Every structure is written in C-alpha cells, then in structure tokens.
Image (cartoon, rainbow, N blue to C red):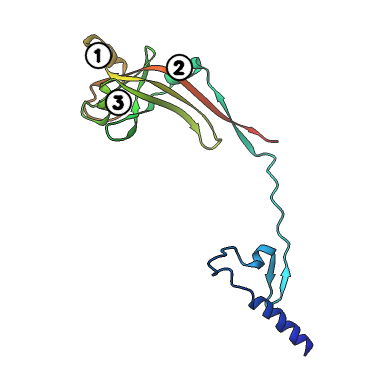
Amino acid sequence: MPTSIRTTSAVADVDQRPDRRISAPDCSPPPSRISGRRPRADGRLVEVAEPPAPHPDPEEVIPTFTEIAEARCLELLQSQTVGRVAWFARDAPEILPVNYVWHENCVIFRTSAHGPLSELSQPTDVAFEVDEIDQQHHQGWSVVVHGRAEGVVRPADVVRLFAASGVPWASGMRILIIRITPTRVSGRLVATQSNA
C-alpha cells in the first residue's frame, strides 16, 4: 500500500503543475522540456541526458571578400554580354536585364523606343551590374558601374554604335541606343577558404 501511495503522489505532482502551455502570461515550454526530464508510462519523471552541442566541421569553408582592382573590373565588363541596369523610374526603383557591349569605355545597349528602358534616353543616373556566380562552391564576382545613361542621337554615333552594340536577345525593333558613361567602377570577389 505505501508503494501505491508514493506512485500516486508522483503522478499527482505532475498533474497538479500549472499548465504552462495554455497559460497566457507564460508561453515557455513545459517544465519537462526545460529540465531535460521525460515522463515514463507510469507517470514518473526520468532524467534524460541532453545531446552534446555539435562540433564545428573542421572542413567548413569561410567566405572572404576582396576588392577587385579597377583595371580588372574593366576586363570583366568586357568579358560579359548580359548585365542589369537599375535606376529610379517614374513611379518606383527599377532594374532590368539587358544585352550590352563594353565599347570605348562605356556600356552600350539597344532597346525599344516604347519600352521602360526608353526612359534612359534622357540623362539619368544609373547603376549597372554584371556578375558570375558559382552557387555550388559559394564563390564568384560582381562589378558595378555607377554613371549616367542617355540616348545616342548624333547620326554618326548612331551608325557607329549600332554596328558595335550587337544583336539584342529580345525581339522587335530595338533601335534606341543607350550609352552609360561611368563615373565610378568597383567590384568585389567572393571566394571560400577552408577553416581546417
């Protein structure tokens, strides 16, 4: 009979605890989760050893960022054909991809005279970005050109740059030539190194 009383008491101690899971003032987890104790089938609480904190993987890689020299940035700009141009449009900030060429130290691309990029025919401050990313190995580079965009209107420049600008991927009449003259060019390289 004493054994039965002790068992009932142990169960009663558990049952009479405030139900913290539904108590509005206290939203902490049940005490058994906090203390590391777990109830057995008979209602008794037993101590359960918490798993040790995982050790950091010695082969874990750490990303490092490096500034790219301006001369190298210009080489990277020349190596690509697709970039993104960003500017403050009429109603909100805008960013769109374009086919481009790096020609005479400027970004040149062709677009429709009736599309959203036609806003850049008027002198506009822009940012132009190109990159190459290796998502599997967490490394890559990015180059950003800050400058002023405007439409090319001089007939001699139109003829010369139309031939140099290449063929846009987008279909339709892409006869409006936009030139971005840089005021600043910068870039960053992200690579990974072992923490071993």
Could you tell whether 110 is left or right of 41 in the image? left
Is residue 42 visible in the rendered structure shown here? no
Indicate the amino acid at tag 1: Val
Which residue lies at the image location 69% right of the left edge and 74% below the top edge? Answer: 40
Q: Which mark is residue 74?
A: 2
Along the line of sight, the residue nearer the viewer: 93 or 64: 93
Residue farthest toward the top in the current orientation of the protein: 156
Dot 2 or dot 1, earlier in sequence: 2
Give the Cα separation between the discs numbered 1 and 3: 16 Å
Of the 4 image quadrants, the one containing the C terminus is top right
Vertical placement of residue 29 versus 179, above or below: below
Residue 129: horizontal and vertical position, in percent?
A: 41, 26
Is residue 20 visible in the rendered structure shown here? yes
Vertical placement of residue 87 versus 52, above or below: above
Vertical placement of residue 160 versus 138, above or below: above
Q: Nearer the viewer, mark 2 or mark 3?
A: 2
